[in-house]
């Protein structure tokens, strides 16, 4: 393990795990697997696009190294985070005779990480999973923290489980194959990390914006490492999201509502960018957030090519109604994780979220 590799300490009975970050890691995968989780059998769960780019080559490489490896492909996109797809993957593993000594390799973006993680959490009451993120969003956010789940008609990620990975393996080289729109969408979570925990990081992103968008290796590695370190610290402090970990939901109450309203056609990063600006504006109107914070975040998100306003045809009232059903809601109230100022999360009387009435929420959305 490199001294620079972040370690997540869940603190809920799960063992600590390392986030390995380097170029060309897929080519070294067999050695890391034997160190992190020596299984009798490995199952790569991925989508059809990632299978073509990386999955088949990884399976062949691991097979050549003497490991027993299966590959299960699912259709790409949020539509695969469903009960039927979860059932299909599970039944396939049962039919193939995968036992409790197996291990799932979640190779893909956030959808695959959530789906494969949930399969691992529920298969034979739980088998190991190794997260191998292939998108920027998954690298810096979705692959960390042990949250797994699927979408249901009532909302996003409403059925799931905490199931921490044995390791997270980040190969920065795979970002070369990531479409520009997906790369930019992942930057929304980097902005969120700066917004809740590190103003200097936010400032650097603004200064390094051209280098980041050009995917210059040094800039990309700094961005990925800094975001992972912030997420790792936060998760280690609160494994079950009962306290400070709630700050990672900044922008997500509105963001998840927008995804739900658009039947998950809206890109996650776009929804979170809009959500951060709206929720910062809400905090300003409530007197909890430093004036001008929404402008700062909006300017940076816009610089990354991300939207910062509600899309045409989506009304503030509809967003407010959709947000009530989000899993962060309590007793019908809409709860928000806000920021005090860029770089600092908001806390009130020891709590990291606050309930906001519908009228004030709609006022902020209507701006």
Image: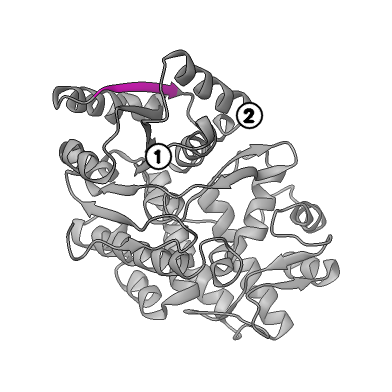
Could you say where residue 2 lies in the image, as x and y percent from the top left? 17, 60
Q: Is residue 241 left or right of residue 366?
A: left
Cα separation between marks 1 and 2: 20 Å
Say how many tags the image has. Answer: 2
Q: Which residue is mark 2?
A: 83
Looking at the image, which residue is at 47% across and 57% down?
13
Q: Which residue is mark 1?
A: 128
- Which of the 4 image quarters holds residue 87? top right
Could you say where residue 121 lies in the image, as x and y percent from the top left? 51, 39
Looking at the image, which residue is at 29% across and 68% down?
208
- Which of the 4 image quarters holds residue 57? top left
> In this picture, is 366 found above or below 140?
below
User: Helix, strand or loop at disc 1?
Assistant: loop
Q: Which residues are magenta?
A: 68-73
Could you say where residue 229 lies in the image, as x and y percent from the top left? 35, 66
User: Helix, strand or loop at disc 2?
Assistant: helix
Asked whether 76 or 119 is in front, the reply is: 119
Looking at the image, which residue is at 32% across and 49% down?
167
Screen quadrant of the N terminus: bottom left
Q: Nearer the viewer, mark 1 or mark 2?
A: 1
Q: Which mark is residue 81?
A: none
- Magenta: main secondary structure: strand
**Residue 120 lies in the magenta-colored region:** no
Asked whether 58 or 301 is in front, the reply is: 58
Q: Quick check: marks 1 and 2 in contact, CB under 8 Å?
A: no
């Amino acid at each position: 393990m490199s001294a620079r590799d972040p370690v997540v300490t869940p603190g809920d009975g799960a063992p600590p795990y390392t986030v390995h970050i380097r170029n060309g890691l897929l080519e070294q995968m067999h050695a890391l697997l034997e160190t992190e989780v020596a299984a009798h059998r490995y199952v790569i769960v991925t989508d059809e696009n990632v299978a073509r780019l990386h999955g088949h080559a990884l399976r062949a490489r691991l097979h050549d190294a003497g490991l027993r490896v299966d590959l299960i492909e699912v259709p790409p996109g949020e539509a695969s985070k469903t009960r039927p797809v979860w059932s299909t993957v599970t039944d396939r593993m049962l039919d193939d005779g995968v036992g409790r000594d197996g291990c799932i390799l979640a190779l893909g973006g956030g959808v695959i990480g959530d789906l494969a993680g949930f399969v691992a959490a529920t298969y034979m009451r739980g088998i190991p999973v190794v997260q191998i993120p292939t998108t920027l969003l998954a690298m810096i956010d979705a692959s960390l923290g042990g949250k797994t789940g699927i979408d249901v008609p009532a909302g996003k990620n409403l059925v799931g489980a905490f199931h921490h990975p044995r390791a997270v393996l980040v190969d920065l080289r795979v970002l070369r194959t990531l479409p520009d729109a997906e790369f930019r969408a992942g930057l929304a979570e980097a902005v969120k990390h700066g917004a809740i925990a590190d103003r200097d990081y936010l400032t650097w992103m603004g200064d390094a914006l051209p280098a980041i968008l050009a995917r210059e290796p040094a800039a990309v590695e700094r961005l990925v490492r800094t975001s992972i370190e912030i997420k790792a610290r936060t998760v280690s402090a609160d494994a079950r999201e009962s306290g400070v970990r709630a700050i990672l939901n900044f922008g997500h109450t509105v963001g998840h509502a927008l995804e739900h309203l658009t039947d998950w056609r809206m890109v996650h990063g776009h929804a979170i960018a809009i959500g951060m600006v709206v929720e910062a504006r809400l905090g300003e109107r409530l007197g909890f957030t430093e004036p001008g914070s929404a402008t700062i975040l909006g300017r940076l998100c816009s610089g990354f090519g991300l939207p910062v306003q509600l899309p045409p045809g989506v009304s503030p009232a509809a967003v407010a109604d959709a947000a009530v059903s989000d899993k962060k809601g309590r007793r019908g109230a809409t709860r928000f994780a806000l920021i005090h100022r860029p770089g600092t999360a908001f806390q009130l009387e020891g709590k990291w979220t606050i309930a906001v009435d519908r009228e004030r929420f709609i006022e902020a959305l209507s701006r």
